[in-house]
Amino acid sequence: MITIDSADLRALARSEARACRIQCGGAMNAIFDLVDDLALDGQFVAFNVPFPYKSDIVMLKPGCFGNVAKLRVGFWVDHEGSTEVGSTEDSLELMIDDDGAQFRLDLARCKNGHVLARMCEVDNRSAMSHGSDILAEHRETIAGQSVRVITRARLREITLCKEGAAGENAFAMVVDKTVTPKPVAGSRSLFFNTSRTLSKVSRTVRKLKASVAATYGDREQRRPVRWPTVEESNQAQTAEVERLQQQARASL
């Protein structure tokens, strides 16, 4: 008797549903995958970690957001209010401790969950950021740098974006809610730490690609390479042989 793990069964069921949609409605239906059991988990800021922001260096202190339980915090894309897909009133949950601020967005309960899942999975949008109203701050010198330290702020939104200022400490990942426990304040799972590492690698690769494109140009902009014809190659080879023969005779 063959025993199949429950998680594998669910994955198989989703694959069968996707295949059915492709067969019935075309390949584009594969994009609109089922998100009933999926969520976005991640972190949108790490406290006590300075990061560059515009022309300054910023650091958020633990407790700066205060009690967010009674606040309405939206989940946006690219800091655009018109893109809001959910909030803490319906599909978004926040878990904030002294290390950072984690979240879970239920993709089945928010708007356009399938689009968010796709963007995150293909690394089109997998970084996180946030928007807040600064209420109290001061300057500190840390490692010889003047740092803007935020001690009080009113959190308005967290956002899914392409590149967040907080780097590897602000990321999102698609998870299966049936097998992935909800993020918990005061704890970071092995899956969380692995995802943060993958986010760092992905961010480094994107920067490297951008640097290469800036130096050498995009593939579409580069002049195509023209390879020599067989005749041209034979002519070049003949000329080289003759040159070597003349060099050899001259040395006798």
Image (spheres, rainbow, N blue to C red):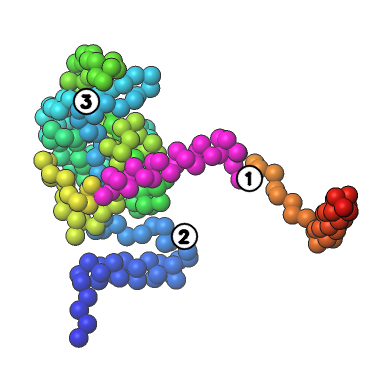
Amino acid at the residue labelled 1: Glu
Along the polypeptide, which appears first: circle 3 or circle 1?
A: 3
Q: Is 181 placed left or right of 30 in the picture? A: left
The correct choice, above or below, for 94 with respect to 30 in the image is: above
Considering every residue shown, the one lying at the far top of the view is 139
Near mark 3 (Cα within 10 A), the count class, few <14, some 14-19 or many ≥20, is many
Provide the major secondary structure of the magenta segment. Answer: helix
Query: Where does the magenta region start and end?
Result: 194-219
Which residue is found at the position 30% from the left and 46% from the top?
Answer: 197
Cα separation between marks 2 and 1: 26 Å
Cα separation between marks 3 and 1: 42 Å
Which residue is found at the position 38% from the left and 19% from the top?
Answer: 55
Give the image quarter of residue 132. top left
Task: Depth check: give the residue in front, 182 or 143.
Answer: 143
The residue carrying mark 2 is: 28
Near mark 2 (Cα within 10 A), the count class, few <14, some 14-19 or many ≥20, is few
Considering every residue shown, the one lying at the far bottom of the view is 1
The correct choice, above or below, for 140 with respect to 226 in the image is: above
Residue 206 colored in magenta in the image:
yes
Where residue 210 appears, as percent x and y from the top left, is: 50, 38
For label 1, the SS is: loop
Residue 99 appears anywhere in the view: yes
The residue carrying mark 1 is: 220
In which quadrant of the rendered image does the N terminus lie? bottom left
The correct choice, above or below, for 71 with respect to 212 in the image is: above
The residue carrying mark 3 is: 60
Which residue is found at the position 78% from the left and 55% from the top?
Answer: 228
